[in-house]
Amino acid sequence: MTSALPIIIDCDPGQDDAVNLLLAYASRDEFDILGVTAVAGNVPLEMTQRNARIISELAGADDIRVYAGCARPLVRELVTAHEVHGPTGIDGVEIFEPKIPLQPGHAVDFIVNTLRHAADDSVTLVPTGPLTNIAMALIKAPAIASKIREIVLMGGAMREGGNTSPSAEFNIFVDPHAAHVVMGCERPITMIGLDATHQVLCSPARIEPIKALGGASAGAVYRMLAFFNKHDTEKYDSNGAPLHDPCTMAYLINPQLFKTKKCNVEIETESPLTMGHTAVDFWRVTNRRHNINWVYAVDADGFFALLTERLARYG
């Protein structure tokens, strides 16, 4: 029997981040969750750290430590996505003050200290928001890079263009300078952008089985996705909103659901017109280093079957 994979989840909940946390907590036999770190993104930090604790409490994950990290990007002013996620960030779930405490200390220090005490190539980082916390940790303590087994992140876009500007996906747009730092860390990075996540649509046929599971966690997922669907279904004229962030945990659980290609990805940090654009050298037309394992296709039905099966574990 293989041992559980040590992971740190860095997030900005967000309904899709919340579903990703529930997927992770339902898979504790496969993952040793060392901690959850919150960053400003979909909503401000005060809400993202609270939302991470609410979802942890909903899942019964009282033992998971939650840390608050960076309240703004490295260089730019914070841009949020209240119009997508609602005033609370996780509209569809009742908001309460969780009993799970916010841990003392900064999330960046937690990441640095955890990696410093880890074995080489041992800890997987799973960022599903702007990459500010991860970049700050790498800037503060460059030697921790050797401890990272892999970074599996949600962010970027190639053929799909952008969902926040004409050419930039939200997570990268919010903090392109942090993304630039992470892309250059010379550790294995799997990047799941809009080209993949726009294939994972929350159609009624896919989320009704989640509703049918019953129970607090599955019910919360269904309500969050029903709310989440309202904005993006109209935006994309699609049969359901794309479910972005849970693709990261699903990839770690069953990578066979995803198609990938090694290629170079660089981040635009200077152009006002294309700030945060991910330049994906998919056809390898340059000689730049293949720094990213780029995900370009997903078995969407297989993904939702996995998600539904894991949510059923909550009972």
Image (cartoon, grey):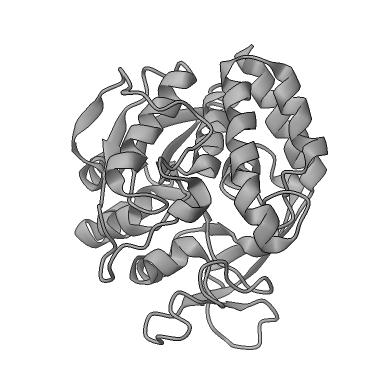
Residue 197 placement: quadrant = bottom right
Confirm whether residue 138 shows in the render. yes
Measuring from the top left, give residue 57's x and y in whole percent.
41, 20
- For image coordinates 36% across by 23% down, the residue present is 96
The location of residue 237, given as percent across then percent down, is 74, 60
Closer-to-camera residue (222/19):
222
- Name of the residue lying farthest toward the top: 315
Quadrant of the image containing the C terminus: top right
Residue 2 vs residue 281, the one in the foreground: 281
Residue 53 falls left or right of residue 124: left
- Residue at 36 percent across and 18 percent down: it is 63
Can you tell which quarter of the image residue 109 is in?
top left
Q: Is residue 113 above or below residue 132?
A: above
Position of residue 276 relative to residue 24, above or below, is below
**Whether residue 35 is visible:** no
Point 31% across, 53% down: residue: 133
On the image, the x and y values in percent for residue 163 come to 57, 66
Quarter of the image where the N terminus is located:
top right
Q: Position of residue 314 (x, y in %)?
A: 60, 15
Is 9 displayed left or right of 222 in the figure? Answer: left
Q: Quadrant of residue 180?
A: bottom left
- Residue at x-position 32% and y-position 37%: 49
Q: Is residue 148 above or below residue 96?
A: below
Exactly how many numbered labels are in the figure? 0
